[in-house]
Image (cartoon, helix red, strand yellow):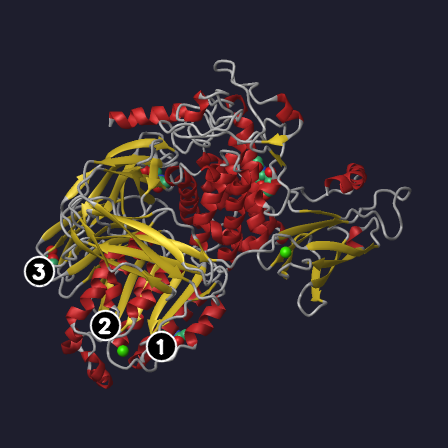
């Protein structure tokens, strides 16, 4: 532990590479803060624009913004649960650039590799836009985090700030633009600092000629490769800074070489990050931008069905259709409206395609067009369908899979578990006509007798295993009970659903469970799946309840198939559930509450800077581990205890909890359970309405079961962009802390792209080996398609596996880097004193240039008039746009996007009438201006100030364009 603390201090002191990435970096801005500020800022701007467009007010919350305050301001309070993890993820992908690519100067705008750094940013930006267009948001967030790092480093590592710039360099995000005058190799840029004082180490000549440079950096103890006369990055780790010219120019922290400019650099980095996000917003559209952030009205949760459509599924499909109608009819327009609808049909041998829509009626149409047909033999491609659903739905989703047959593609099991663990998605299996149920069947089901043979108990074990791994349930019912069972489960799913306790027993034995119910919980439910599972429930008052004597606490006790549902009257305090069954069962206690938590395993980075990297696969068995826990609703509650609990037994490991402020907790564990486990969090809710120190204990448990592995699978150094027709090499390494032998390698991808990989690797005990997978997208594959590649290694015997999951984006080589151009054709108005009774109109010609990809999208951002556009040439190269509006809405912003996402925002205004003496009659004062940044000016009052500003604007217009 002590050396860890020492490492922190060392790291803090160094200021290292780029704004710090350490979450505990005191007064200085780090990459996480810079990223968060910009994400919150632009999200607020987008929500404001949407509110104004709907004629509503938007009230900015108090500074500093938080994910919660912005979600509330966006009128999507429940989205907070998704928005916050998305911010954390983008921050982690940003920090990972320091942890994973420390030695590659271009990723940090070091060594004067500014053109190369920009290339990374603009390529990544194209990929983000393409991925957004295909709603591949996870891949978009991943790439976004990485490019933001390089962009932010420009302001800390280059001399942009020293050159006196007050605004960000927009050309850092524009591929073909002139970035400025970059120092060539022979131009000296620095002199040695005066001892520790580096205020004047950049040569006057460089400043006066406006030459751009950045510091050289080599991690000590490697030796310096700095050309003569060049500036260094500076700081403890930098081996170049002790070579003439000594010192450095980085502004990473307050105590860095140019620490006196740290705050300015950080401000510019925030503004530049906002600018890049604005560009993404322009390309994707406002609502899509909010989807990328995880903000949507309603529950923000996706509704995802994976449906067997083979011949025997007629009744099941009817039930799915009925459930869909019920949900859509009951939830659309309410707080629990799904933000996204996903359908994946599967058959045999076909499966998919994945259908994803935000339109409830559209989804209904797809569901109602499902037909039961074909399928050949009994087993079907259920895991292929599930894999597609897992990669195509947002993290933390809930999936419902309907089938009456075993899986034909069982070989995907580990890959599916990997995706479940990574996405923390819950999968519920709705299984009909199981052999084990035959003796209970009703006479009226005789027509289904044939299908009852379809699935033996052993076959459904696979589904039970997957359900258990995900924290879902495997519900087995007859076909005529399916509707009822599905309704029970779906009813409780909402974004405020929390799990208090869940346990699985493959061999039951008498057992007593306890759980704390707090006063924020409503709709408390216990689900018990399994056959003939007897229970006794004891409420905090000590009253006993069972199936024959339901007492005061059980509102209803319902048994459908193997699913028992107990709805409880919530009573604050400690409850006890005794189960005496020897049959296998799954038991879970759920409720609705705003108090929940997010957790992420973090690993100590192997790099010289230390720091913690997000762990996206299984933690290493037998070793200590760190968990970052974030409490939602942190204002009113605190975490006191975090435990890793074995999901199938009673073993547990307690962590050492350390509060970091703002709802963040850092938890250290000496070891990890050797079998599947879940994370259990306990804490106190402070009741502020009572004056005394009253508090209530709460508990929440993670749904996903996790496990440790002696293996590590690491993909290092790969690009995330897949160019159609060109193979992408994915080098990976497999490491074991256990025995050696022959390790089986399996790689799969959800798009069925050509994929080769070594079928096995030989490892020595405690050793490692490298392999390379090779994936090729067909030359016809569409830009923006998300590809999830899972590489999995299996230790001899098959009991231990680990994996790495990669999210790639298909992106054909981008050659069009020029935004479309707007040309004003005419602007007319008859604006009078009474703006309500007068109109103005304009017409604009929009083109994407000769080598452009063509206009893809034209939309209105500001102005509540009517926009019309007509393609005037067949290939879409020229578009005539007309706009007319009331004179009460004197400004308009037209957002024009080409096919690869280059954005132009064209702004026009009509002068309001001020007084009869100044006002022109027809034609009026025109301010055609065009810029790629939005002005966030509020609705303009018709007053003299505005007129003066407009005249100034006219005068300055040509220079600034
Ligand atoms: C917030 O974002 C807007 C654009 O959405 C930008 O104009 C503004 O500069 C940003 N604010 C800060 C503090 O970066
Ligand atoms: C769903 O099923 C219930 C019960 O059988 C029935 O009353 C209802 O009309 C059905 N709804 C739809 C939309 O099919
Ligand atoms: C249920 O509880 C009642 C009263 O506490 C008891 O008499 C009965 O035997 C219990 N039944 C079962 C099935 O445990
Ligand atoms: C706070 O405590 C009071 C009195 O015990 C209770 O009535 C109220 O519901 C509690 N409020 C919350 C938010 O827990
Ligand atoms: Ca089949
Ligand atoms: Ca273009």
- Regarding mark 1 in the picture, which secondary structure is present there? helix
User: Outermost residue toward the bottom?
Assistant: 447
Label 1 CB sits under 8 Å from any ligand 2 atom = yes
> Label 2 to label 3, Cα distance in Å?
25 Å
Mark earlier in primary sequence (1, 3): 1
| Place of residue 446 in the rendered image (x, y in percent of width and height, measured from the top left) | 21, 85
Residue 223, placed above or below residue 345: above
How many marks are shown on the rendered structure? 3
List the residue tagged with mark 3.
582
Q: Label 2: which residue? A: 406
Q: Which residue occupies 40% across, 69% down?
A: 324
Quarter of the rendering occupied by the N terminus:
top left
Label 2 with label 3: CB-CB less than 8 Å = no
Q: Quadrant of ligand 6?
A: bottom right
Label 2 CB less than 8 angstroms from ligand 5 = no
Say if 759 sits above or below 241 in the image: below
Q: Earlier in the sequence, mark 1 or mark 2?
A: 1
- Left or right placement of residue 783 versus residue 639 in this view: right
Q: Quadrant of the C terminus?
A: top right
For label 2, the crowd category at 10 Å Cα-Cα, with few meaning under 14, some 14 to 19 and many 20 or more, is many
**Residue 318, numbered circle:** 1
Please name the residue shown 79% across and 37% down the image. Answer: 952
Mark 2 or 3: in front is: 2
Q: Tell me the quarter of the picture where residue 487 sits.
A: bottom left
Q: Earlier in the sequence, mark 2 or mark 3?
A: 2
């Amino acid at each position: 532990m002590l050396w860890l603390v020492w490492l922190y201090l060392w790291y803090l002191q160094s200021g290292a590479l780029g704004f710090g990435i350490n979450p505990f970096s005191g007064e200085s801005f780090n990459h996480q803060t810079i990223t968060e500020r910009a994400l919150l800022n632009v999200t607020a701007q987008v929500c404001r624009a949407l509110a104004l467009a709907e004629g509503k007010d938007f009230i900015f919350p108090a500074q500093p913004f938080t994910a919660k305050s912005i979600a509330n301001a966006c009128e999507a309070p429940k989205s907070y649960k998704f928005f916050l993890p998305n911010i954390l993820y983008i921050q982690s992908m940003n920090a990972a650039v320091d942890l994973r690519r420390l030695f590659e100067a271009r990723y940090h705008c070091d060594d004067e590799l500014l053109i190369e750094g920009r290339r990374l940013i603009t390529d990544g930006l194209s990929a983000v836009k393409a991925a957004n267009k295909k709603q591949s948001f996870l891949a978009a967030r991943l790439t976004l985090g990485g490019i933001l790092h390089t962009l932010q480093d420009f302001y800390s590592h280059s001399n942009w700030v020293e050159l006196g710039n007050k605004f960000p360099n927009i050309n850092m995000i524009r591929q073909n633009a002139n970035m400025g005058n970059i120092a060539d190799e022979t131009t000296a840029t620095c002199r040695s600092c005066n001892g520790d004082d580096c205020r004047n180490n950049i040569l006057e000549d460089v400043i006066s000629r406006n030459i751009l440079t950045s510091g050289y950096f080599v991690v000590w103890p490697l030796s310096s490769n700095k050309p003569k006369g060049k500036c260094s990055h500076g700081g403890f780790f930098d081996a170049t800074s002790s070579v003439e010219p000594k010192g450095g120019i980085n502004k990473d922290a307050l105590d860095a070489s140019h620490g006196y400019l740290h705050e300015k650099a950080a401000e510019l980095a925030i503004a530049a990050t906002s600018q890049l996000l604005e560009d993404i917003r322009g390309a994707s559209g406002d609502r899509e931008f909010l989807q990328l952030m995880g903000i949507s009205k309603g529950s923000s949760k996706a509704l995802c069905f994976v449906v067997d459509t083979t011949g025997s599924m007629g009744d099941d499909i009817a039930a799915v259709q009925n459930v869909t109608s019920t949900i859509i009819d009951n939830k659309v327009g309410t707080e629990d409206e799904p933000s996204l609808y996903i359908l994946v049909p599967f058959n045999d041998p076909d499966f998919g395609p994945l259908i994803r829509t935000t339109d409830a009626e559209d989804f209904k149409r797809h569901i109602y067009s499902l037909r039961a047909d074909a399928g050949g033999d009994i087993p079907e491609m259920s895991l292929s369908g599930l894999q597609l659903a897992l990669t195509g739905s947002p993290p933390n989703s809930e999936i419902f899979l309907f089938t009456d047959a075993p899986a034909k593609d069982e070989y995907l099991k580990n890959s599916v578990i990997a995706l479940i663990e990574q996405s923390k998605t819950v999968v519920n299996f709705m299984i009909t006509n199981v052999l084990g149920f035959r003796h209970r069947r009703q006479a009226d089901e005789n027509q289904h007798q044939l299908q009852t043979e379809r699935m033996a108990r052993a076959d459904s074990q696979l589904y039970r295993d997957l359900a258990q791994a995900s924290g879902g349930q495997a519900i087995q019912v007859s076909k005529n009970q399916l509707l009822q069972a599905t309704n029970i489960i779906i009813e409780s799913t909402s974004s405020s659903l929390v799990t208090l306790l869940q346990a699985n027993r493959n061999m039951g034995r008498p057992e007593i469970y306890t759980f704390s119910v707090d006063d924020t919980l409503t709709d408390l439910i216990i689900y018990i799946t399994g056959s003939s599972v007897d229970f006794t429930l004891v409420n905090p008052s000590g009253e006993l309840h069972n199936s024959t004597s339901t007492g005061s606490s059980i509102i209803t006790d319902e048994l459908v198939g193997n699913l028992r549902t107990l709805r409880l009257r919530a009573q604050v305090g400690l409850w006890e559930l005794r189960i005496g069954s020897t049959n296998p069962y799954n038991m879970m206690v759920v409720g609705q509450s705003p108090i929940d938590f997010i957790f992420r395993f973090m690993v100590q980075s192997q790099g010289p800077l230390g720091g913690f990297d997000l762990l996206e696969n299984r933690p290493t068995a037998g070793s200590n581990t760190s968990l970052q826990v974030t409490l939602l609703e942190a204002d009113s509650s605190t975490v006191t205890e975090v435990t890793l609990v074995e999901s199938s037994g009673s073993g547990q490991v307690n962590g050492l909890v350390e509060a970091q402020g703002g709802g963040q907790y850092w938890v250290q564990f000496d070891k990890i359970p050797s079998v599947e486990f879940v994370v259990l969090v306990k804490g106190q809710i402070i009741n502020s309405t009572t004056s005394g120190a009253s508090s209530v204990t709460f508990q929440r448990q993670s749904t996903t079961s996790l496990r440790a592995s002696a293996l590590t699978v690491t993909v290092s150094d790969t690009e995330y962009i897949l160019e159609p027709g060109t193979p992408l090499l994915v080098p990976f390494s497999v490491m074991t802390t256990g025995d050696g032998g022959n390790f089986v390698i399996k790689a799969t991808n959800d798009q069925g792209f050509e994929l080769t990989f070594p079928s096995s690797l030989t490892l020595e005990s405690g050793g490692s080996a490298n392999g390379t997978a090779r994936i090729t997208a067909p030359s016809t594959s569409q830009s923006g398609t998300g590809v999830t590649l899972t590489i999995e290694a299996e230790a001899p015997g098959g009991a231990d596996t680990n994996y790495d999951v990669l999210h790639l984006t298909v992106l054909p080589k981008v050659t069009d880097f020029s935004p479309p151009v707007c040309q004003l054709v005419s602007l007319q108005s008859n604006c009078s004193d009474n703006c309500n009774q007068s109109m103005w109109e304009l017409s604009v010609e929009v083109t994407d240039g000769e080598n452009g990809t063509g206009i893809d999208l034209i939309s209105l951002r500001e102005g509540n008039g009517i926009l019309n556009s007509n393609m005037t040439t067949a290939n879409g190269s020229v578009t005539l746009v007309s706009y007319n509006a009331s004179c009460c809405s004197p400004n308009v912003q037209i957002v024009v996007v080409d096919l690869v996402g280059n954005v132009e925002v064209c702004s026009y205004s009509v002068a309001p009438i001020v007084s009869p003496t100044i006002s022109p009659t027809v034609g009026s004062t025109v301010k055609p201006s065009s810029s790629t940044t939005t002005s966030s000016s509020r609705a303009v009052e018709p007053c003299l100030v505005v007129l003066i500003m407009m005249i100034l604007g006219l005068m300055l217009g040509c220079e600034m364009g």
